[in-house]
Image: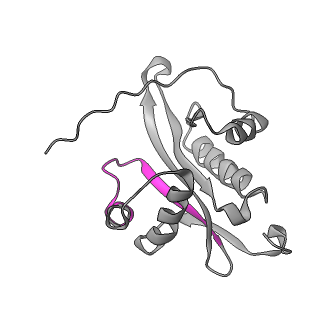
Amino acid sequence: MSNVKLLEVVTTIRLATREDAPAVRNLLEQLGYEAELPGIERALAEGFGHAEARVFVYELSNQNIAGFVSIVRLFYFPELRNITRITAICINERYRSCGIGTQLLDFVESLATQNGDAAIEVTCSMRRARAHHFYLQHGYAQHSYKFVKPLLASS
């Protein structure tokens, strides 16, 4: 972040709104996803088809969105308890390595703790070595593989 330290900037972590859709779309594109703006607007305005899904944005005092995290709480049957899953997290390239990711993880951990969740889990692309290191530094452990089978969308 050029010559400004984030500690000198007032920041807010808040629930994302429809108006945040362009910034969230830009961040998703930085992650390599092609998301359509109307779909993001609809999801932020109307919900995500899951009562426990949320997107939070990290907003700087100049009202720029520097990052976001999306989470969902779900019942994890093997432990018979709820967990929080981070489904996506991205910090704008201009603001990486300034502590925003840590603040978002701390925020999610606080929410999960308040809700009595058993754990927080996050999946991460195998090609994101820097992100893997970030999660390991923050107490996350790699203990499973994720397998995905794409399904054809219904017409």
| Nearer the observer, 117 or 71 | 71
> Vertical placement of 107 versus 38: above or below?
above
Q: Picture coordinates of residue 35 (x, y %)?
A: 40, 57
Say if the magenta span includes residue 131. no
| Nearer the observer, 12 or 60 | 60
Q: Splitting the image into 4 quarters, where does residue 154 fall?
A: top left
Image quadrant where one finds the C terminus:
top left
Q: Splitting the image into 4 quarters, where does residue 38 fall?
A: bottom left
Image point (65%, 69%), residue name? 12
Say if the magenta span includes residue 57. yes
| Nearer the observer, 77 or 139 | 139
Image point (57%, 30%), residue name? 118
Position of residue 113 in the picture relative to residue 75 (left or right): right
Position of residue 28 in the picture relative to residue 61 (left or right): left
Query: Which contiguous range is marked in magenta?
Result: 43-59
Image point (70%, 49%), residue name? 106
Q: Picture coordinates of residue 28 (x, y %)?
A: 50, 56
Q: Picture coordinates of residue 83 (x, y %)?
A: 52, 34
